[in-house]
Image (cartoon, rainbow, N blue to C red):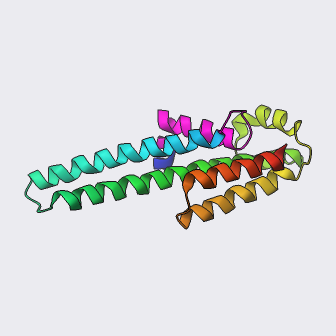
Amino acid sequence: DVELARFLLTEDGRRLRSSALALAGAVERPAPWRGLLETAEATGADAEAVARKALEEEKAAGIKRNAKEMGDEAKRSGRRRRTEVLDLGLGLSASWLRDLAATAAGAEEAVFNRDRLDQLRAQVTTLHDPAAPRRAAELVQDTRRRLELNVSEELALEALCFRLERELS
């Protein structure tokens, strides 16, 4: 996905990848979910601003819309982008945990994050149970499904971090 790759090369994308690794336990940080949520919120706010500008340009070109419709459409665009970025961050976390499980099982050839094998190997040495990363990846995927149901993103991410900490420590 070229658009996804381009996003991951931006400052927001690098911040998202860093936050995803923190969420997966690769980087110790207090409230590791907060960085993921803040990156998603910032990207959503940017998308809302871009959509608002485009709608205002359309209005100036003669397309009839009232201010409420324009505001609602811009907010929907921002929320949609925020949700996409949050899901991407969780997907990156799940991918890291999958790679951690593969590394722990001695299947390094199956690792997606090949550029970070040394970091994966180092994290494997801290595991009390080599199967824990697989279970942790399942917890992340479960949280992704929960977010589709419009649960509170902040609470879902915080709960996920508590579960991940218990699973991986």
Q: Which residue is drawn at 67% across and 47% down?
A: 93
Drawn side of residue 151 relative to residue 75, left or right: right
Q: Is residue 20 magenta?
A: yes
Magenta-colored segment: predominant secondary structure: helix
Can residue 10 be seen? Answer: no
Q: Residue at x 57, y 43 (%)?
A: 36
Quarter-wise, where is residue 20 in the image?
A: top right
The x, y position of residue 49, in whole percent, is 30, 45
Drawn side of residue 79 relative to residue 99, left or right: left
Residue furthest to the bottom in view is 149
Residue furthest to the left in view is 62
Q: Is residue 129 magenta?
A: no
- Residue nearer the viewer, 122 or 149: 149
Q: Which stretch is magenta?
A: 5-31
Q: Across the whole image, how many numbered discs are drawn on residues?
A: 0
- Residue nearer the viewer, 108 or 11: 11
Quarter-wise, where is residue 108 in the image?
A: top right
Q: Residue at x 88, y 42 (%)?
A: 127
Quadrant of the rendering where the C terminus is positioned: top right
Can residue 58 be seen? Answer: yes
Q: Residue at x 73, y 33 (%)?
A: 28
The x, y position of residue 107, in whole percent, is 85, 48
- Residue nearer the viewer, 18 or 168: 168
Q: In this view, does 16 lie above or below 135?
A: above
The x, y position of residue 95, in whole percent, is 69, 50
The x, y position of residue 78, in whole percent, is 38, 52
Q: Is residue 137 above or below residue 146?
A: above
Drawn side of residue 68 relative to residue 154, left or right: left
